[in-house]
Amino acid sequence: LQREGSMIPQNRLELADWLVSGHHPLTARVLVNHLWQLIFGAGLVRTPEDFGLQGEPPTHPDLLDWLAVELMESGWNIKHILRVMVTSETYRQKSHLTQTMLEMDPSNRWWSHATRRRLPSWMIHDAILHSSGLMHASLGGPPVRPYQPEGVWQDIFMGRLTYEPSPGASRYRRMIYAFWRRSSSPAFLFDQAQRRICEVRQRLTNTPLQALTLLNDESVLEASQFLSAQCLRNYATREGIEWMAVRILGRPLADEEWTLIHQQYQDVHDAFSQRPYDAKAYITIGQQLPDRSLDPADHAALMWVANMLYNLDEAMTHE
């Protein structure tokens, strides 16, 4: 531990100071590699759990060193490093893969194109809350309990403990504040790490639980209900659906997409018009009560469209 006249750490505070000092550059390298992995889907070192001799060498060692130095010289400003990464030409490439790229860089180790990948579940959850307008953006504080399937704790704890979602706006906080038990993680985290061991590599998953969750989870349906209610209050049908598409997908709909979605909207609207009780039941979800000033069939049909948009590949994929 002794380098360039530095003293051997005698307690945990001195050890922490040494880990983030210029005499221990491994800490900065590991951190920027994790941030690169978060942004690009894979790190400059493809074995983030092992920076030793048994791990893979960095694909771009000079870039890794430069980012590590930039992080330390910026005062360990993580926002600054993330901004550097996402404004780089490498990050802003298209994800379109040509035959030449496939032959020369099949694993995208040289970052010849943007990596197209499914978002992790916690990102999807937070993106849904944000696009719907439900997100409660407060920082810090105690954990909150998001929606869980009914009876999720009963079998595990023999009925001794029951699960109740947090009331009020705190229910719409980011997933980082979600309450965990060691034996039962939030159901929305369909790709969470196994907590029996330490995992530092992202799980990129295409599990069927993803579609099951996005179609049926109460938090997604509640976000769809809230977003569609705003749409009805402020826009006509076409403008409203276009507005929801921009909120969820980040782009306007093409003409052929609008035609298809409008046909689906009409079919669902006709079905709910014939079954008003089903329409009212559908839009009564979570803490969101139906707005009596809105037609239930209109609201239910637009809610169905919003949920369909949330289930599109673009809404859950990093392009």
Image (tube, rainbow, N blue to C red):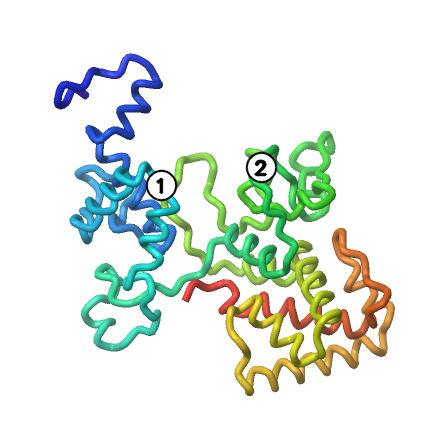
**Figure label count:** 2
Cβ–Cβ under 8 Å for marks 2 and 1? no
Disc 1 designates what residue?
77
Amino acid type shown at disc 1 = Asn
Instruction: Say above or below: 250 vs 259.
Output: above
**Position in image of residue 112 (x %, y %):** 24, 66
Q: Earlier in the sequence, mark 2 or mark 1?
A: 1
* Label 2 secondary element: loop
Query: Which quarter of the rendering shows the N terminus?
Result: top left
> For residue 235, which quarter of the picture?
bottom right
* Label 1 secondary element: loop
| Residue sitting at x 55%, y 86% | 255
| Residue sitting at x 35%, y 47% | 80
**Position in image of residue 216 (x %, y %):** 66, 60
**Position in image of residue 189 (x %, y %):** 54, 49
Disc 2 designates what residue?
180
Given residues 95 and 17, the one toward you in this image is: 17
Label 1 CA crowd tier, 10 Å (few <14, some 14–19, many 20+) = few
Amino acid type shown at disc 2 = Trp
Query: Which quarter of the rendering shows the C terminus?
Result: bottom left
Q: Nearer the viewer, mark 2 or mark 1?
A: 1
> For residue 31, which quarter of the picture?
top left
